[in-house]
Image (cartoon, helix red, strand yellow):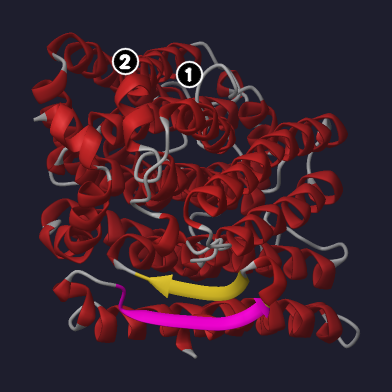
Amino acid sequence: MMLLCLIIVPLAGGLAALAAARWSDRAARATALAATVAQLALACVVWAVGGGLTLGAGGAAMNVDWTWIPGLGIRFALFVDGLSLLLVLLTALLGVQCVLASWRSIQERVGFFHFNILAALAGVTGVFLARDLFLFYVFWEMMLIPLYFLIRIWGHQRRLYASLKFFIFTQAGGLFLLLGILGLHFVHAANTGESTFDYLRLLGGHMPLQWAMPLMIAFLISFAVKLPVVPVHTWLPDAHTEAPTAGSVQLAGLVLKAGGYGMLRMAVPLFPAAAVQVAPVAMALGVVGIIYGALLALGQRDLKRLVAYSSISHMGFVMLGIFAWNDLAIHGAIIIMLAHGLTTGAMFILVGLLDERLHTRDLGKLGGLWALMPRMGGAAMVLVMGSLGLPGLAGFVGELLVLLGTFKVSVPLAAAGAAGLVLSVIYSLRIMQETFHGPRVTESKLPDLTPREWVIMATLIAGILWMGLWPQRFLDTSQPAVKKLQESAVALTEARR
């Protein structure tokens, strides 16, 4: 029941926060915080129990499997392995930070705000745990609605435009996912006579290339929109810029990871023969994303938009690592997803704190803030160093593994990806220079990090340091899952050898 509770706790907590808002906003916030802390505690227990037992043997640590719609072969089936477990831990941790970061900034419709935060957490958690592909699609769409409301109601000036663009892009991507799932179901039924949406039963099944290619492209388009991959990335900067802080954290820290997870879990292992042919194009798109996102980040004046474009660049490394498809590259992609969730999530919270104090995100109106807020400046320095991939921090480990894995497959693509690291150094140091150094733009007294804000930053920075200094704990957790994925995608694995 622990897997089910990982989904039920935030969903029930959201409903309870909505009800508690009738008494007071403080009660709604406290209820939401309790629910997210409870989800994080459950995820840690699953890691402690599952990570040391069944996961080490190479299978799923825990399973839930109940009949749902038997006539169509649809089941309410959940499972967890090392890959999904790490992403569930990231989801739960960032859920706590979302509630804490919104403690003072959200003053309107507080109960409904926290309901949407927790409903989105439940949807993302369901995506990482679903074993039945139809159930996976249900949770995939479940993420969309609360995030739309977060941007539409609590967003900034252009929130209507941003929320509609986000909805259209992600809904279109979801349609491709539904078509891919249904097509896979019917082709499998025609070949085997078995009507099922069970991922483990569909995995490794023989499929003619004329069917595998269009089905994989349908899956790939859907996941590419969420990741996002150039050229279907344009919703992301607008959504990030207009979303409230908690919405930006969920988009960058969790929703983007759902795209990477889908590629790792489904797009390649379910269609390995098609993946062999698609891999060169997909890796090239990853490199384009790395360089294009970094170049656009260099040209931004809005600090939040700069961080948003940096996400496109970082996710390009994930795309590159997944389709390089060897041990080093896959592990690197997983570490980058985790590191990006912590680092960029913290960066968006930091931008939100600056916006609350200065009421601007324009780099031209910032500067010299270190003297006024040294603790915030110190936190920003660590986060910026993490974003550019400084050794000893989480981002370095992931990017190094991806580039080493890509080098085995394509030296030119690895070299081009490494060039993106140089650009990331430039825009990252620009954040520090134009925000915290240089001439002071205000003589007003500004409050430094409060105890609540310090807890947020210290927690996320601790995670970044842990992954950077002791990555083996995370690699050991994901290793059995990575091995199983490689065994499933025999065609691509053999092609890479």
The vertical placement of 451 against 87, above or below, is below
**The magenta segment:** 60-68
Callout 1 environment at 10 Å: few (<14), some (14 to 19), or many (20+)?
A: many
Identified at 41% across, 33% down, the residue is: 315
Q: x and y percent of residue 38 in the render?
A: 51, 85
As shown in the figure, which amino acid type bears the numbered disc 2?
Leu
Q: Say whether marks 2 and 1 touch (CB < 8 Å).
A: yes
**Residue at image mark 2:** 423
Which residue is nearer to you in this view: 57 or 392?
57
Taking 27 as reference, is 91 left or right?
Answer: left
Which quarter of the picture shows residue 388? Answer: top left
Identified at 61% across, 45% down, the residue is: 248
Identified at 17% across, 42% down, the residue is: 397
Which quarter of the picture shows residue 416? Answer: top left
Which residue is nearer to you in this view: 78 or 375?
78
**Residue at image mark 1:** 297
The vertical placement of 234 against 44, above or below, is above
- Which quadrant: the C terminus? top left
Is 376 within the magenta? no
Residue 445 seen in this snapshot: no
Residue 42 seen in this snapshot: yes
The span from disc 2 to disc 1 (Cα, nearest Å) is: 9 Å
